[in-house]
Every structure is written in C-alpha cells, then in structure tokens.
Image (tube, rainbow, N blue to C red):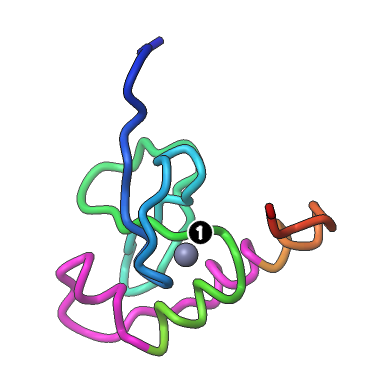
Amino acid sequence: MTRGVEPVRTCVGCRVRAAKSDLLRVVAVDGALLPDHRGTSPGRGAHLHPTAECLELAVRRRAFPRALKAEGPLDPTSLSAYVANETNANESGTEQ
Ligand SMILES: [Zn+2]
C-alpha cells in the first residue's frame, strides 16, 4: 500500500487531471481498445474517465492511437460496452 500523494493522470477524453484510481486504464490489444481494470496489462496505457462522454470525446479526437502510439485505427467496441455497463451499474453516475 502506498500512502501520501496519489498518482494523477490526464483523461484522454476531457483532458482533465484526476487521481489515477478514478480513471480507467485502457490498452490496445490486436487493434482493439480494451479496459484494463486491474491496471496490470503490460505496455502503454491511456487513462479515461469510465463514462460514455469521455470515451466519445477520446474517440472523436483520435486520442487513443496517439496516446497508445498505435499505427492504425483502434476498435472501441469492447471498451464502449464496458463503459456502458459501468454507467448503468452506478445510476447516480456523475459526482458533483
Ligand atoms: Zn474525462
């Protein structure tokens, strides 16, 4: 367990900085974007708020290929299914 300063990452969707634990780590595997909920997959990761808004922004800006240094387009299907699921799971969604 680490104490003290929590690592901060920038969301590739809204570009807001947030605690790493509030963001979902996303990795690219075989040209597809996959959620890395345990944060343990090797290689490059992009960080995203697990919300449909941030995912859409990131896809629209092509932020994933840039952040993950991917050559071609990345398929967001699995990731958007995961995010949709997360969003439904906690109805109160937005923290205000
Ligand atoms: Zn965001």
- Residue under label 1: 49
Vertical position of residue 38 compared to residue 75: above or below:
above
Q: Nearer the viewer, residue 95 or 69?
A: 95
Q: At x 21% / y 53%, what residue is drawn?
A: 44
> At 22% from the left edge and 67% from the top edge, which residue is drawn?
67
Which one is nearer the viewer's eye here, 32 or 92?
A: 92
Q: Which residues are magenta?
A: 61-83
Q: Residue furthest front?
A: 96
Q: Quadrant of the N terminus?
A: top left
Residue 62 left/right relative to 39:
left
Residue at far bottom of view: 60
- Residue plotted at (33% across, 86% down): 61
Residue 95 x %, y %: 68, 53
Q: Is residue 32 above or below residue 39?
A: below
Amino acid bearing label 1: His
Name the quadrant of the C terminus: bottom right
Q: Quadrant of residue 33?
A: bottom left
Dot 1 falls on a residue whose secondary structure is: loop
Residue 23 screen position, x and y as percent: 47, 49
Which residue is drawn at the image coordinates 53% and 67% (left, top)? Answer: 79
Left or right of 36, for residue 95: right
Q: Is mark 1 within 8 Å of ligand 1?
A: yes
Magenta segment: does it hold 72? yes
Judge left or right: residue 51 versus residue 38: right
Rate crowding at label 1 as few (under 14), some (14 to 19) or many (20 or more) other CA atoms within 10 Å: many
Q: Nearer the viewer, residue 95 or 51?
A: 95
